[in-house]
Amino acid sequence: MRNFAAATSSSPEPDQLVRVQGDDQTYEFNGELIATATTHRPDKPRWLDMELWRVTDGTGRYVIGRIGKSLVYHKHDGPCGRGVPTPAMELNFNAIPCADCGAPSLNIARSIPGRLVMREAEHPSASVCQDAHEVLQALRLPDIGYSAPAQRLLDTARLRDEKINAAMSVIKRL
Ligand SMILES: [Zn+2]
């Protein structure tokens, strides 16, 4: 469970205590949400949610939260080798069976007591950035540049954060 989910949906209040889940630890800080972006589409079973938080302790730091999400589940002893064992009864009604491993349909899986499937887990990660330049660095992929959601995240953030905007407006004299 991500405790800040509630904070995200309520109106932004400066200086709220925030928790962002990293891959191996949870970061807790006073912060303000300045941008979100998602690759979610109704027809896609997997997507990425991104958030950019400003840390409001005067250090000028930022935290980027990313979480890979999936509705897909696999056959328990199937060839895909992905996911975590989960009782089918605990699947959400929007869960989607993997087409590659013959995962049982949701109705069938849920009708067998004790039936296990392999549900793809959420993959959270987080980056703590010392300043706005590090935010840009952390979001930029080598040789590729910004991914579409990263670009949307920054386009929103620069409207709400002077330092992000300044970092994105640097002119390099050749
Ligand atoms: Zn599969």
Image: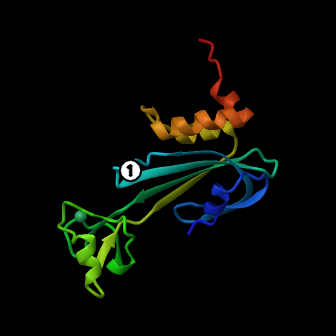
Q: Is any part of residue 47 visible from this angle?
A: yes
Establish if 172 lies above or below 166. above
The location of residue 98, given as percent across then percent down, is 25, 62
Q: Is residue 29 left or right of residue 74?
A: right
- Left or right of residue 40: residue 99: left
Q: Position of residue 172 (x, y in %)?
A: 62, 17
Q: Taking 62 as reference, is 103 above or below it?
A: below
- Judged from this view, the residue extending furthest toward the bottom is 113
Q: How is the image coloured?
A: rainbow
Q: Secondary structure at mark 1?
A: loop
Residue 45 drawn at (x, y percent): 35, 55
Q: Residue at 29%, 88% (x, y): give it.
A: 113
Give coordinates of residue 111: x percent, y percent: 26, 82
* Quarter in which the N terminus is drawn: bottom right
Count of numbered marks = 1
Which amino acid type is shown beneath numbered disc 1?
Pro
> Would you identify the image quadrant in which residue 20 lies?
bottom right
Q: Residue furthest right?
A: 58
Query: Mark 1 Cα within 10 Å, few/some/many (few <14, many 20+)?
Result: few
Q: Is mark 1 within 8 Å of ligand 1?
A: no
Q: Quadrant of the C terminus?
A: top right
Q: Is residue 142 left or right of residue 170?
A: left
Towards the viewer: 161 or 7? 7
Ligand 1 occupies quarter: bottom left
Q: Which residue is mark 1?
A: 42
Quadrant of res 87: bottom left
Residue in the image at 20% along x and 71% along y: 78
Q: Residue furthest top?
A: 174
- Along the viewing direction, whichever of 74 and 63 lies nearer the viewer: 74
Q: Which residue is found at the position 34% from the left and 49% from the top?
A: 43
